[in-house]
């Protein structure tokens, strides 16, 4: 590989103040630095009020930085100007509980909303809708179903299809599995894992669900009080048990177990993420 | 204390519930449920989306009436409009969405809403508000505007607003679904505390770790009870749960893995702390057996 | 896009109201007294025809504001926006309204621009009226939360419940509306962002009404759906807590007017009454002539 790695998204020294200039103003982001490279999945975790959602809304130009910059494929957000629609195509943002944004009577029309707005020809739109629906596991014939008749899991997938139909290079997701039952969650996680295999795609996931982060993310940024306090590989971040708990965060169950054992004096490594590895480690202690 | 010797609080027999929207097909949400909730019991109701959890719960306080069958709270049948107040002040309900179950603009006024509706004399109102807020740990926020609370605090307020009616049972309809892990922990701790004070707790949840804390787990599937019993019995039926699109608590998943390496490792561990203790004692025994 | 966000931020700010709790003596005053005095103040500000009356009212309002312990600059901030508008209106009054010139003594004349003592008074009076009303409303909103306002109106209207006037239901409706404005504003903001992320464009450049509606559907339809859902959730919550209308309900909040409150009411009414008396006595012209004479002497 001779090409230097340009981050597909870069956040530089980002500041944002909520309700600026009023009596209720609060600094939600206070100098955030972040880089997302092609083909990687990045997790963002942080307690409520840490500025996660605000950060995400900067990534496709919904909010302009008050100070600092956001670069998409090397170009500053301030220079995109009228071409901001292109950014929205390249960076697909999936909001929390996205089924709330469904408005078309028929399911297929809602998925087509994005591509139509992007100016594609009807035949292209149709192809994109079909591919997007198939990717989320909804048969194409669902396009004629009434949106209101779909179950929560189906609606969630439909909303996701609506974003995938724009064929983004970066998928940004805010709490993707919130409110889903275990089966719905499994389905969604496998769709996201599958999507990554398309190649040259990157993903950013903000979540409270640490198990999701473990499953999807290669690297994790920990946001607290508007700043990134920890940024490293997933395994490394979760080994910082005390820092995470102090900042009101949870850790995956595996780490709860290992940390509990460590506190009782057992020599366990905290750089473990899967149940399998944890079991092996315990077996190791058992045999010793 | 055997739960079975406690008096029945809510008795459900042959419950069917069918509804229809406009000219759509009728939906059979509940298809024959028999269930008894006893005084002071802690029951979790689990099931996939669409299994009827919420619908069932709303029959407990007569928000919904059966199409067939009966729901009796203490001695009152939910079909009788005269006893609606009695039923609803016996079974309080806490919903999922923090914002839309708070009615008043000030915390203490929201807590007072229920008793005000019951015509509780004014001298007693203040006391009830105080006690309810104390039980959920929000006494210091009594005069706070209700929109200035965190999501977790709002859900605790919802509990207080149900508690002020002095119910014998609290029903929770996925009340932790919208909370972050810290808020969820505090909420569940509050539920346990209230249970220790003798209030029956019925919680419909997606979270298996939460369900594992109950005395009894009821598994719904397509409007009927598929299986019920203590969590250690229900959650060890792995195949059934997978068929019903459910999972087991995370501690059990971990215990299962450990079991593949250490044969005979207990599989019915319901919480991570329990798991840690068990691993610790296993390793301790091993050490002493080697000596 | 950032402008849209700021619009909603201000909506949230508005609905929260300008209540600034400082715990002052004005805050602790029975809100019913404040409502009554506020209404009387506005009425008298409109009725009075005398500058001296206006000065009396203004002095009373400024005194009241000082009691709230809220920074004066916040109160004056609302005036700042109206300043130019007021001055222009006043100037028009002073210089050009012909009816006022009849039977009045001329003070100044150049071409068509005339100032008579009457027009001068009425121009300045206009400014004073606005200032008194605006500062009075600020005084009220700084020291009274919307909750208190609704409670006091409900209490004041309660006697009417005996003849079937739904005071409680109205108050509850007002309460719930106020609660839900910021919630729905937040939902609308989220929806706009979500649809904008899918390429929706809410800036209407075409005048076509039908097209405008079509463009707004991605916002209006989900907003409607989510509002209905909220309403449904609210009904369930209210029914679960045995709400069955206003009959037989007791109330946690009891407004107790004490001696201090009644005294304040008495004093306030006395001040307003004196302002009105002065107005009817019509001593302005003599007072103003006296002032003008003395000023010209000084120069």
Image (cartoon, helix red, strand yellow):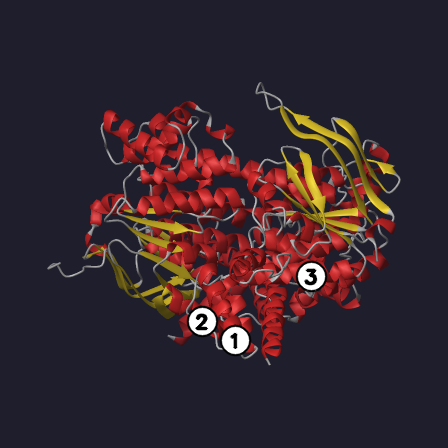
* Mark 3 and mark 1: Cα distance apart in space: 29 Å
Residue A116: mark in rendering: none
In the rendered structure, the answer to whether residue B117 lies left or right of residue A213 reads right
Question: Residue placed at 37% from the left, 57% from the top?
Answer: A217
Q: Position of residue A43 (x, y in %)?
A: 38, 59
Q: Nearer the viewer, residue C2 or C169?
A: C2
Which of the two discs, 1 and 2, labels the residue nearer the N terminus?
1
Q: Which residue is mark 3?
A: B190
In the rendered structure, the answer to whether residue B4 lies left or right of residue C119 reads right
Count of residue discs: 3
Is any part of residue C227 visible from this angle? yes
What is the chain letter for disc 3? B
Classify 10 Å Cα crowding around label 2: few (below 14), some (14-19), many (20 and above).
many
Is any part of residue B106 visible from this angle? no
Q: Nearer the viewer, residue C112 or B52?
A: B52
Q: Mark 3 or mark 1, which is nearer to you?
A: 1
Q: Position of residue B152 (x, y in %)?
A: 59, 59
Displayed quadrant of residue C120: bottom left
Q: Nearer the viewer, residue C183 or B138?
A: B138
Displayed quadrant of residue B141: bottom right
Q: Which residue is mark 2?
A: A270
What is the chain letter for disc 2? A
Q: Which residue is mark 1?
A: A262
- Are the residues flagged by discs 1 and 2 from a single subunit? yes
Q: Is residue C281 above or below residue B225?
A: below
């Amino acid at each position: 590989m001779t090409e230097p790695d340009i981050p597909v998204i870069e956040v530089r020294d980002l500041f944002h103040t909520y309700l600026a200039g009023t009596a209720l103003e609060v600094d939600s982001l206070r100098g955030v630095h972040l880089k997302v490279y092609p083909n990687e999945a990045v997790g963002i975790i942080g307690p409520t009020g840490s500025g996660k959602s605000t950060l995400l809304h900067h990534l496709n130009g919904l909010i302009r930085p008050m100070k600092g910059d956001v670069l998409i494929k090397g170009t500053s957000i301030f220079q995109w100007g009228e071409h901001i629609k292109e950014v929205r195509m390249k960076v697909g943002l999936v909001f929390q509980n996205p089924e709330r944004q469904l408005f078309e009577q028929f399911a297929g029309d809602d998925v087509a909303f994005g591509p139509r707005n992007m100016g594609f020809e009807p035949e292209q739109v149709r192809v994109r809708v079909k591919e997007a629906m198939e990717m989320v596991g909804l048969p194409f014939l669902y396009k004629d179903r009434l949106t209101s008749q779909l179950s929560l899991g189906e609606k969630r997938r439909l909303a996701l299809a609506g974003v995938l139909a724009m064929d983004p290079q970066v998928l940004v997701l805010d709490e993707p599995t919130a409110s889903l039952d275990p089966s719905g969650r499994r389905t969604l996680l496998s769709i996201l894992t599958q999507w990554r295999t398309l190649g040259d795609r990157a993903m950013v996931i903000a979540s409270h669900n640490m198990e999701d982060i473990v499953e999807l993310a290669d690297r994790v940024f920990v946001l607290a009080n508007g700043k990134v306090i920890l940024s490293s590989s997933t395994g490394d971040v979760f080994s910082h048990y005390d820092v995470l708990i102090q900042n009101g965060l949870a850790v995956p169950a595996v780490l709860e177990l290992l940390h509990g054992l460590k506190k009782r004096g057992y020599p366990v490594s905290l750089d473990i993420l899967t149940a399998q590895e944890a079991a092996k480690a315990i077996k190791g202690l058992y045999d010793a | 204390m055997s739960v079975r010797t406690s008096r029945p609080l809510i008795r459900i027999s042959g419950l069917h519930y069918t509804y229809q929207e406009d000219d759509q097909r009728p939906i059979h949400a509940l298809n024959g449920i028999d269930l008894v909730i006893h005084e002071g019991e802690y029951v979790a109701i689990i099931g996939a989306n669409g299994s009827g959890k919420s619908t069932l719960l709303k029959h407990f306080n007569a928000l919904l009436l059966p199409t067939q069958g009966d729901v009796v709270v203490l001695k009152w049948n939910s079909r009788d409009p005269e006893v609606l107040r009695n039923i609803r002040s016996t079974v309080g309900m806490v919903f999922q969405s923090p914002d839309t179950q708070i009615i008043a603009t000030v915390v203490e006024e929201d807590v007072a809403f229920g008793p005000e509706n019951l015509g509780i004399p004014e001298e007693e109102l203040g006391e009830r508000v105080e006690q309810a807020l104390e039980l959920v740990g929000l006494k210091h926020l009594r005069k706070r505007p209700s929109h200035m609370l965190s999501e977790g605090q709002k859900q605790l307020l919802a509990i207080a607003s149900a508690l002020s009616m002095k119910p014998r049972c609290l029903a929770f309809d996925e009340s932790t679904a919208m909370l972050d892990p810290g808020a969820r922990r505090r909420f569940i701790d509050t539920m346990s505390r209230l249970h220790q004070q003798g209030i029956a707790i019925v919680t419909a949840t997606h979270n298996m770790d939460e369900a594992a804390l109950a005395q009894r787990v009821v598994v719904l599937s397509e409007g009927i009870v598929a299986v019920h019993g203590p969590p250690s019995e229900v959650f060890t039926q792995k195949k059934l749960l997978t068929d019903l699109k459910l999972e087991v608590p995370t501690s059990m998943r971990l215990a299962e893995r450990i079991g593949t390496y250490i044969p005979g490792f207990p599989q019915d561990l319901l919480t991570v702390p329990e798991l840690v203790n068990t691993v610790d004692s296993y390793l301790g025994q091993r050490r002493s057996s080697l000596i | 896009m950032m402008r849209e966000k700021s619009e909603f931020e201000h909506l949230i700010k508005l609905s929260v109201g300008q209540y600034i709790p400082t715990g002052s003596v004005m805050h602790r005053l029975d809100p019913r007294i404040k409502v009554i005095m506020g209404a009387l103040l506005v009425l008298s500000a409109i009725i009075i025809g005398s500058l001296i009356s206006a000065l009396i009212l203004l002095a009373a309002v400024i005194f009241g504001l000082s009691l709230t312990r809220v920074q004066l600059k916040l109160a004056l901030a609302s005036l700042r926006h109206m300043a130019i508008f007021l001055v222009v209106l006043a100037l028009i009054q002073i210089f050009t309204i012909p009816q006022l010139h009849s039977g009045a003594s001329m003070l100044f004349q150049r071409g068509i621009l005339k100032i008579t003592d009457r027009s001068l008074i009425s121009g300045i009076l206009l400014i004073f009226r606005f200032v008194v009303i605006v500062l009075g409303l600020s005084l009220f909103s700084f020291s009274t939360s919307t909750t208190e306002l609704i409670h006091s109106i409900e209490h004041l209207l309660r006697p009417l419940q005996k003849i079937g006037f739904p005071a409680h239901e109205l108050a509850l409706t007002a309460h719930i509306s106020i609660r839900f404005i910021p919630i729905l504003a937040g939902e609308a903001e989220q929806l706009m962002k979500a649809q904008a992320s899918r390429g929706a464009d809410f800036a209407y450049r075409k005048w076509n009404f039908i097209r405008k509606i079509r463009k707004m559907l991605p916002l209006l339809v989900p907003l409607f759906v989510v509002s209905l859902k909220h309403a449904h959730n609210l009904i369930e919550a209210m029914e679960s807590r045995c709400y069955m209308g206003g009959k037989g309900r007791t109330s946690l909040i009891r407004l107790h007017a004490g001696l201090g409150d009644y005294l304040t009411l008495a004093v306030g009414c006395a001040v307003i009454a004196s302002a009105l008396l002065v107005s009817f006595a019509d001593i302005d012209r003599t007072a103003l002539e006296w002032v003008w004479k003395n000023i010209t002497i000084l120069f």
